[in-house]
Image (cartoon, rainbow, N blue to C red):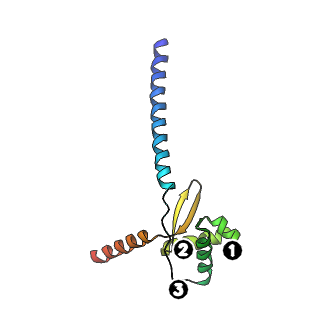
């Protein structure tokens, strides 16, 4: 009976050590992402006029805050959270915003220059494949 307790203890110790190793690696990854702050794209006013009024209002709210979720945007615009969530996702699909999961919430921010170049590059590759 004593021998099986020793084996179980050693297995639990190995599992614990592996979990701690994973935790430290995740902490390092999280630190590297938290320090990453891409510069937002300068969008001329004429480009903003291409957006419908309801989406432009949502976009400008996110631009004024830097990064926020649908709840914050809905509090600032006075519209329903579900409506703002829909508008934010439309802007993300259109390429005006990028989204990032932060635990349970999805945060939206202005898209950076590098992401625009990558999107344009991938679109030209797809066009060339046809």
Left or right position of 69 against 42: right
Q: Residue furthest top?
A: 2
Reading the image, the residue beneath label 3 is 50
- Give me the C-alpha separation between circle 2 and circle 1: 17 Å
The residue lying at 59 percent from left, 55 percent from top is 104
Reading the image, the residue beneath label 2 is 90
The residue lying at 31 percent from left, 73 percent from top is 125
- Examine the rendered structure and indicate whether residue 46 appears above or below residue 19: below
Secondary structure state at the residue bearing disc 3: loop
Left or right position of 29 against 103: left
Secondary structure state at the residue bearing disc 1: helix
Can see residue 130? no
Reading the image, the residue beneath label 1 is 77
Secondary structure state at the residue bearing disc 2: helix
Asked if the residues shown at circle 3 and circle 1 are in contact, with their CB atoms under 8 angstroms apart, the answer is no
Can see residue 56? yes
Left or right position of 116 against 43: left
Left or right position of 44 against 116: right
- Give me the C-alpha separation between circle 3 and circle 1: 20 Å
Mark 3 surroundings within 10 Å by alpha-carbon count, few (fewer than 14), some (14 through 19), many (20 or more): few
Residue 100 at x, y percent in the picture: 52, 61
Foreground of the two, 34 or 11: 34
Q: Which sits earlier in the primary sequence, circle 2 or circle 1?
A: 1
Q: Which sits earlier in the primary sequence, circle 3 or circle 1?
A: 3
Instruction: Name the image quarter holding residue 67.
Output: bottom right
Q: Which sits earlier in the primary sequence, circle 2 or circle 3?
A: 3
Residue 11 at x, y percent in the picture: 45, 25
């Amino acid at each position: 009976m004593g021998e099986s307790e020793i084996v179980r203890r050693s297995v639990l110790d190995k599992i614990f050590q592996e979990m701690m190793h994973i935790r430290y690696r995740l902490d390092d990854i999280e630190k590297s992402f938290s320090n990453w702050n891409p510069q937002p794209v300068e969008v001329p006013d004429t480009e903003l006029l291409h957006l419908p009024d309801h989406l432009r209002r949502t976009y400008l709210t996110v631009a004024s805050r830097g990064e926020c979720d649908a709840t914050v945007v809905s509090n600032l615009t006075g519209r329903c959270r579900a409506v703002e969530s829909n508008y934010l996702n439309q802007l993300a699909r259109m390429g005006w915003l990028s989204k990032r999961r932060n635990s349970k919430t999805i945060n939206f921010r202005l898209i950076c220059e590098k992401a625009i170049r990558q999107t344009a590059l991938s679109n030209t590759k797809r066009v060339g494949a046809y």
